Image: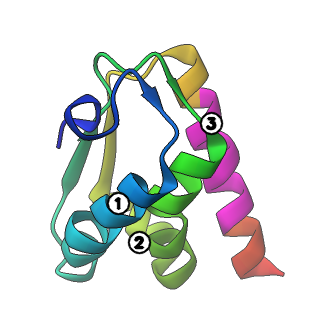
Amino acid sequence: MKIRNLAGRFAEDKDVARRIRTEHVLPAVEAGKKIVLDFSGVDVATQSFIHALVSAAIRRHGNEALRHLEFKSCTRSVKSAILTVVDYSLEVIDA
């Protein structure tokens, strides 16, 4: 799934992220299928965008969700936002 086609070079729209989560991320994770989130062409993704995109799947399915999510072609900034959200989402489970 090409994130740039849906969210642009600056991925910040949480409504777009929620739609991707609802229509693609959660169904794939819940079906045990891999979903590739391709960030090529995305310069920046806000933490709130990434949170809306994947946090619910991680909170519901824990580390199992991460086995089905692949983050591709991430800039350093995008990777940092993803790592922050993943760490936070996993901490919420452990709390």
Q: Quadrant of residue 41?
A: top left
Of residues 45 and 32, the one drawn nearer to the viewer in this rendering: 45
Q: Which mark is residue 49?
A: none
Between disc 1 and disc 3, the foreground one is: 3
Q: Is residue 21 above or below residue 82?
A: below
Q: Is residue 44 magenta?
A: no
Mark 2, residue position: 64
Give the CA separation, mark 1 to mark 3: 19 Å
Residue 37 in the image: state x and y as whole percent: 28, 42
Mark 3, residue position: 81
Question: Magenta stretch mostly in which secondary structure?
Answer: helix
Q: Quadrant of residue 6?
A: top left
Residue 30 in the image: state x and y as whole percent: 26, 82
State yes or no: discs 1 and 2 in contact (Cβ < 8 Å). Answer: yes
Please report the residue visible at 41 percent of the width from the left and 65 percent of the height from the top: 18
- The amino acid marked with disc number 3 is Ala
- The amino acid marked with disc number 1 is Arg
Residue 64 in the image: state x and y as whole percent: 41, 72
Give the CA separation, mark 3 to mark 2: 20 Å
- The amino acid marked with disc number 2 is Glu
Choose the circle earlier in sequence order: 3 or 2: 2
Query: Mark 1 falls on what kind of element?
Result: helix
Query: Dot 3, how many residues are within 10 Å of its Cα: few (below 14), some (14-19), or many (20+)?
Result: some
Residues shaded magenta: 80-89
Mark 1, residue position: 67
Please report the residue visible at 33 percent of the width from the left and 28 percent of the height from the top: 8
Residue 50 in the image: state x and y as whole percent: 53, 48
Query: Mark 3 falls on what kind of element?
Result: helix
Choose the circle earlier in sequence order: 1 or 3: 1
